[in-house]
Image (cartoon, rainbow, N blue to C red):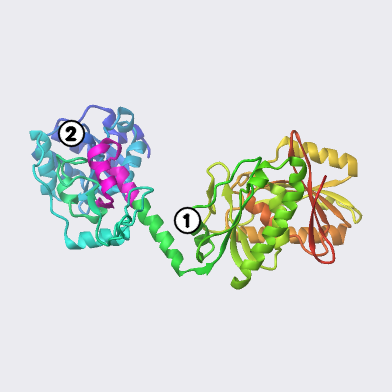
């Protein structure tokens, strides 16, 4: 845009002379081209903006104060020969001066209310401006719900309340188990211009539009219409409907995927309990893996009180026993599924790495990421993001390096990790190999897709093999700072003929030894470090 000030006439007083519209058109045509016209109103028509649209994006806007007849003429002059006229209402909110003065903000608002936008004919334009001229609203309601609209809303809702977070089954009464229709159809934009969320010029037109209708339970129907109407403008209800349909379809899409079991392993962290994945989180996580849940999540370990209340001096041995027992149970239960499963595991990093090592890499048991900040179990990306880390330091190794420090920095590289590496380097004369997330990927979501996790595991497997076979490494001092899923994937890389792995964890301003993972007669053995 060459001149945003000229493109936004609304920073000036409204045009009050029809002849000036033509002058304005000639001016704007020198800097912008558009096809369609949009009419944007806010609550109670406090502001009326005329938008010049190109592919539904606002490229210019203006205001005018004209009679109904002159308004129609102005709109016709602005509209291109093959262009269309769209009318949109921002319900429940008045436009601010800051918004009116910004094409970018108006464009954002216009695109956020697309469910409250409809096409207008010339007669509709005249009727609207005549109503605003007379300061009147139409009485009565728009059309009743037609059978096709009812059917469409029922299909979109799958018989569930579409209010965010509710999802109640409206085909049965939970108390009596009586089957029936216990739902209510509710308008986003009210059917009457005088009703809650009514919009002049839109209420009648959207009255029988299924995009403008929610299926609700009795409680939430009363909430939006009687109890807290100002809290639920039409745009928010439309967003609810849109999000519900997206989530419901995504979950139902999972029905076509191969059924697999899912295991939940929740080890307390510093005596704090960990939240189990919700049904929705499980379904969405498995959907990314092109799988769906078979039955219920198998709870293998669930914040046991003994793990929260034991003295730290004996907790290490208890955790070793728990790791062995949990791994054994998972492998036993996954056997009937040809060892293909999802794993929702969370705990301290050394324990997760050890669990991965005990589960091994000859199966398809995939750990699911959990974001610490939001407590959500979810894959950050629907598609593989490709390489998200670099491996450095191997080039500095000789063919005789008994001890190597392996820094795994995927979520952060804190000072405690550097302090620990310095201490080990002095004590063992060990060199450093670093696995570091790319700067733009560093964080809890570095490992974003199951395919990335599988590739990461294979790379670590090769790295551990090369460290022993080419550089004579017998002990790897692992300093991890990574997500739960990355830790399990790392552990799964451990295999026969790999060096022992001494896993460290954070303690005060450094890191201390917690576990040793080693091979004894081709068997993975976990031992605590006293």
The residue under label 2 is 20
* Callout 2: SS: helix
Name the residue tied to disc 1. 279
Q: Residue at x 54, y 50 (%)?
A: 276
User: Is disc 2 surrounded by few (<14), some (14 to 19) or many (20+) residues within 10 Å?
Assistant: few
Please tell me how many numbered marks the rendered image carries. 2
Residue 162 seen in the figure: yes
Q: Quadrant of the N terminus?
A: top left
Q: Is residue 401 magenta?
A: no
At mark 1, the secondary structure is: helix
Question: What is the crowding at mark 1: few (fewer than 14 residues within 10 Å), some, or many (at least 20)?
Answer: few
Are the two marked residues, 2 and 1, in contact with CB atoms closer than 8 angstroms? no
Q: In the rendered image of this protein, does residue 427 appear above or below residue 344? A: above
Which segment did they paint magenta? Answer: 212-241
Foreground: 4 or 527?
Answer: 527
| The one of 111 and 139 positioned closer to us in this rendering | 139
- Mark pair 2, 1: CA separation: 60 Å
What numbered label is drawn on residue 314? none
């Amino acid at each position: 845009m060459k001149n945003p000030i000229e493109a936004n006439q609304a920073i000036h007083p409204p045009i009050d002379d029809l002849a000036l519209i033509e002058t304005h058109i000639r001016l704007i045509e020198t800097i912008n081209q558009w096809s369609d016209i949009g009419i944007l109103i806010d609550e109670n028509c406090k502001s009326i903006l005329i938008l010049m649209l190109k592919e539904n994006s606002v490229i210019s806007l203006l205001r005018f104060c004209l009679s109904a007849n002159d308004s129609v003429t102005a709109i016709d002059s602005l509209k291109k020969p093959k262009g269309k006229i769209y009318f949109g209402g921002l319900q429940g909110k008045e436009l601010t001066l800051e918004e009116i003065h910004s094409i970018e903000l108006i464009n954002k608002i216009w695109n956020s209310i697309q469910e409250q936008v409809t096409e207008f004919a010339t007669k509709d334009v005249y009727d609207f401006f005549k109503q605003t001229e007379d300061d009147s609203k139409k009485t009565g309601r728009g059309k009743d719900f037609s059978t096709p609209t009812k059917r469409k809303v029922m299909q979109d809702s799958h018989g569930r309340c579409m209010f965010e977070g509710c999802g109640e089954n409206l085909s049965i009464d939970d108390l009596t188990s009586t089957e029936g229709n216990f739902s209510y159809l509710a308008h986003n934009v009210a059917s009457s211009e005088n009703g809650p969320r009514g919009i002049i010029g839109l209420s009648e037109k959207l009255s029988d539009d299924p995009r403008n209708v929610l299926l609700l339970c009795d409680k939430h129907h009363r909430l939006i219409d009687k109890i807290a109407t100002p809290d639920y403008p039409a745009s928010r209800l439309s967003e609810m409907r849109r999000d519900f349909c997206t989530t419901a379809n995504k979950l139902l899409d999972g029905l076509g995927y191969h059924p697999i079991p899912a295991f939940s392993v929740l080890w307390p962290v510093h005596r704090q309990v960990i939240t189990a994945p919700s049904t929705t989180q499980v379904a969405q996580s498995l959907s990314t893996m092109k799988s769906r849940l078979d039955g219920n999540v198998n709870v293998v370990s669930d914040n046991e009180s003994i793990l929260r209340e034991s003295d730290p001096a004996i907790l290490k041995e208890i955790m070793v026993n728990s790791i062995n027992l949990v791994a054994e149970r998972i492998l036993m239960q996954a056997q009937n599924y040809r060892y293909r499963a999802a794993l929702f595991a969370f705990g301290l990093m050394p324990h997760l790495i050890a669990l991965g090592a005990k589960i091994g890499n000859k199966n398809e048991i995939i750990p699911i990421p959990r974001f610490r900040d939001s407590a959500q179990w979810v894959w950050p990306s629907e598609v593989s993001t490709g390489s998200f880390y670099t491996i450095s330091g191997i080039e500095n190794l000789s063919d005789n390096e008994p001890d190597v420090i392996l820094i795994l920095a995927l979520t952060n590289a804190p000072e405690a990790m550097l302090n620990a590496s310095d201490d080990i380097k002095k004590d063992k004369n060990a060199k450093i190999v670093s696995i570091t997330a790319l700067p733009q990927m560093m964080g809890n979501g570095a490992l974003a897709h199951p395919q990335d996790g599988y590739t990461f595991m294979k790379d670590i497997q090769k790295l551990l093999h090369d460290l022993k076979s080419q550089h004579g490494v017998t002990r790897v001092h692992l300093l991890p700072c990574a997500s739960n899923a990355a830790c399990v994937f790392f552990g799964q890389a451990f295999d026969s003929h790999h060096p022992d792995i001494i896993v460290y964890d954070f303690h005060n301003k450094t890191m201390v030894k917690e576990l040793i993972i080693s091979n004894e007669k081709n068997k993975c053995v976990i031992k605590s470090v006293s």
